[in-house]
Image (cartoon, coloured by chain):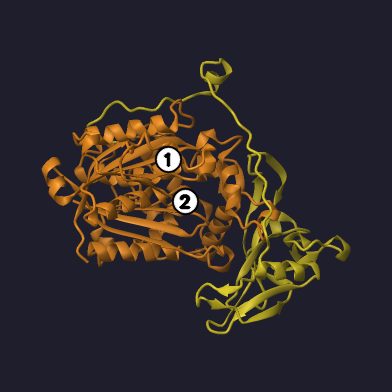
Chain colours: A yellow, B orange
Amino acid sequence: MTVKIDKFPGVYLHESDFEQGRVLYNTWDPQAQYAWDAGIAIGRYLSELKQGHLVGVRCNQCRRTVVPPRAFCEWCFRPMDDWVNLPDTGTVNTFSLCYVTWDMQYLTEPQIPAVIDIDGTRPSVGIMHLLGDVDPKKVHIGMRVQAVWKPEEERTGSILDIRHFKPV
Amino acid sequence: MAMRKVAVVGAGMTRFVRRALETGKELSYEASKMALDYCDLTLDEVDCVVHGTAPDSFDGVHMKGEYLSDGSGAWRKPYTRCYVGGGTGVFAPIHGWYHVASGLFDICLVVCEEKMSSCQPHPQGAFLTIFDHTTERPLKPNLLWIFAMEMNRYMHTYGLKKEDIALVSVKNKRNAADHPCSLLGDANITLQDVLNSEVLAWPVQRLDVSPVTDGAVALVLAAEHVARRICDKPIWIEGVGWNLDTAYWTNRDLCYPRYVEKAARMAYEMAGITEPRKQIHIAEPYDPFDYKELHHLEGLMLFDRGKAPEATALGITQRNGDLPVCPSGGLLGVGNPIAAAGLMKVAELFWQLRGEAGARQVPGQPRRGVAQAWGDLMQVGTVAVLGV
């Protein structure tokens, strides 16, 4: 702020203003529901997950093999050429030990989200998933991990068909 | 291209607070009015209005640009709202710049407002929809995850410790103690305070993060022939740049913000900057998290990759250092009302380059500064270079 001005607008409300009823406000709870179509590329990705397979796609022009699959190469702006079966193993690219939920409720056991670079992709690229069956203190970047799949009868064609990734 | 020179000739700002009594419209009005008064203009003289504000879901108001338009002085004027996530605060003046540089308008009022406190129980809820609805949202991610993972990747790549990064938070919160509008200015905060604050999503701790904030900032932009008439020391917008990286954020290396570099190269080229480390005297990079200031300083090519922490430890980025960084106190100190926070950085350059930043004044009569903002899925960079 400039030295030319010495009075600034903006009234700071404190908890006590609400407790003692000094300010008025109004509330609303929105109800919004959506049904998202999986689309062509992610549709096949999900149906392969239901079969217990992880798949990617390859563009022969830029020679990338990537996951999650996409119908078109966003670099070359042309259709992807091939579907590629990928192993369900990979390497932890990065991770966090998260002790809070989105609305700032505290967790005693951390959730461990990670970016996992999937073997067989070129150049090595990852997906976001959770790590499990592991002591949080022992998680490190570079750790080798493998998918833990739900039993076949419980799979629904969802990213959650992989329960989590665990150390190999 | 024949583009006209564009200057900032006025700026206004509300206090940044955790929860404001004022509505978004009222905050917008206060900042806009202050900016117009600053350069003795009336609303009649404003040709067009640009508004920048973050997601509608913060306020629960559809098309909140239109909702906020009367507070921004936009009725019966050419008016647009722009939105590029957290990058909006530096994109809005760019949007205003091309209105004026093109020759279409002579005077443009740029207003950025954010009232995050309306969103209950926590505005993070408004960000949950940032993730891919089919491949990511079933994992129930929260916003802190991606920043924690980006920070971890940055630390791992360059072998950095938490201490190296927490120094940014200490610097900015101390700088903000001199800002009359700041929410979290603290002249006495220590490194230990930051390192001992509670862990939210390791490596992110409470004092590594900027707070939920309400506030508004406004600028007046003018074409050269108008600026020279109404302003004793116009501050010129010398270069602008913006760039977007892939939304497949798990497919790129998070240790370096390539999109910020591309935006910076665009802005530097326009400004005729060939050696940014010599030609830029103040930097206001976007610092919603302490590691982001470092990340962005490297993306802006002001330090080598992985070397911004060392420069911070050496005091180079202090207000009286060789390259003052966030002399305002940044988002970590002044507060983070998303779009307004970015525009606050441009306003800070305006006050600093005019030499009227008071207790925050960078010594040595700085002549050129860069402001930068960032957002979306860690993928958008917006950059503006301002000079005397």
Q: Position of residue A1 (x, y in %)?
A: 30, 36
Q: Which residue is mark 2?
A: B85
Q: Which residue appears at 66% of the width and 78% of the height?
A: A120
Q: Give the residue furthest to the left.
A: B229
Let me know if residue B307 appears in the view. no
Q: Position of residue B339 (x, y in %)?
A: 42, 44
Using a 10 Å C-alpha cutoff, classify the residue at mark 2 as few (fewer than 14 neighbours), some (14 to 19) or many (20 or more).
many
Q: Position of residue B169 (x, y in %)?
A: 45, 45
What is the secondary structure assignment of the residue under circle 1? Answer: helix
User: Could you tell whether B98 is left or right of B181 in the image?
Assistant: left
Name the residue type under label 2.
Gly
Q: Which residue is mark 1?
A: B66
Q: Position of residue A3 (x, y in %)?
A: 24, 33
User: Could you tell whether B64 is left or right of A111 in the image?
Assistant: left
What is the secondary structure assignment of the residue under circle 2? Answer: loop
Could you tell me which chain the residue with mark 2 belongs to? B
Q: Quadrant of residue A8?
A: top left
User: Could you tell whether B354 is left or right of A65 in the image?
Assistant: left
Q: Nearer the viewer, residue A83 or B18?
A: A83
Q: Nearer the viewer, residue B1 or B324?
A: B1
Nearer the N terminus, badge 2 or badge 1? 1
Q: Nearer the viewer, residue B275 or B136?
A: B136
Using a 10 Å C-alpha cutoff, classify the residue at mark 1 as few (fewer than 14 neighbours), some (14 to 19) or many (20 or more).
some
Q: Which residue appears at 61% of the width and 31% of the height?
A: A28
Could you tell me which chain the residue with mark 1 belongs to? B
Q: Quadrant of residue B22?
A: top left
Q: Does B379 appear above or below B284?
A: below
Q: Nearer the viewer, residue B31 or B313?
A: B31
Name the residue type under label 1.
Glu
